[in-house]
Image (cartoon, helix red, strand yellow):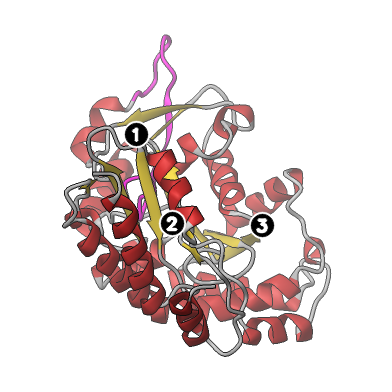
Amino acid sequence: MSSKIAAFAEEAGETRAATATIDLRSDTVTKPSAKMRAAMAAAEVGDDVYGEDPTINRLEARAAEIFGREAALFVPSGTMGNQIAIRLHTQHGQEVICMERAHIAEWEMAMASAFSGCQLRTLPAPRGAITWSEIAPNITGRHYHRAQTGLIALENTHNMAGGTVVPLPVLEDIWAGAAERGLPVHLDGARIFNASVALGVSVRQLTRGFTTVMFCLSKGLGAPVGSLLVGSRELMDRARIIRKGLGGGMRQAGILAAAGLIALEEGPQRLHEDHANARLIAGRLAKLPQVELDLESVRTNIIVFRPRGNGNAAALVSQLGQRGVLCGTSIGNAIRFVTHLDVNRAACEEAARITEEVLAKER
């Protein structure tokens, strides 16, 4: 272990073990804190399939309160939450309008078609956002030759666009237009708290016009497992049935919900640190002639950049891994860094330095 990596590992926290790597692959790689582990060990549990796990019930009630909804449902993953929502809002043979490179289109195993019998109509979203004027012409009503639109699904922040945020006025236009057309709108809000922090708008305000919202506890908020789906009580009652059908009834899962409660209450308060660390790395990389990086797109905790010229993203990721910086490739010969609570300022500075050195050899 290098002295610099050992130093930042020591600084990172008294309860977190030092490692020889700086892991920027995703904010899903975080380890539960000592406080979370203690809460998990002491959690009061019951059979959640019967609705009898008191810790899960508290988590769901608190999530519903924060988002200003009637009810919430704890699910194992964001993918399950999104797919339950699609099933809730659509019928077989319908179409879901979503953004190009949306998570439900790229990373959810074609489940919209396999499980809900729907096809996706993806719209270009260069910066991870689409407007009502772009959505409206693609809506199909009653028709005997084309799939009817059943749902509009948005994502905020947009993962593959580099953690970009969709502003509230854009969302308000979409909510109003969808309401006029009688269409539900679902939000993949895996990182909605990051969007909230970046925009300075509460998640309640930022999501108030969506029919359902999914958000993850296991990304920037730091829980080891779990997501929540929020909406009306009637929808969540139906969602519970669909969750069971997907194998998501987890019985005595209060041990997971206990960590989720801590993540929900404490995680949002420190997300600005991740955003600042991402901007630090991005600012240094953007100065390099070997890098193509849009600094304006770095609004939250994700950095997506491309090597210029004949640079190969996969080869660069491999070289960085050999130097102790773990990251991943993205679509279009791109590289993705994601900051999170297990990489502090010193770690991010070291990751930037190593990346600069590796790229310098590419000249």
Percent of width and height locating residue 226: 62, 62
Name the element at disc 1. Answer: loop
* Residue type at numbered disc 3: Pro
Residue 332's disc is 1
* Residue type at numbered disc 2: Gly
Q: Is residue 236 magenta?
A: no
The residue at which mark 3 appears reads as 76
Q: Nearer the viewer, residue 194 or 330?
A: 330
Q: Earlier in the sequence, mark 1 or mark 2?
A: 2
Q: Label 3, label 1: how many angstroms apart (C-alpha)?
A: 30 Å
Q: Is residue 208 visible?
A: no
Q: Is residue 160 magenta?
A: yes
Percent of width and height locating residue 185: 40, 46
Name the element at disc 2. Answer: loop
For the residues carrying marks 1 and 2, which lies nearer the camera in this image? 1
Position of 297 relative to 4 (above/below): above
Q: Main secondary structure of the magenta part?
A: loop
Percent of width and height locating residue 2: 49, 73
- What span is colored magenta in the figure? 140-161
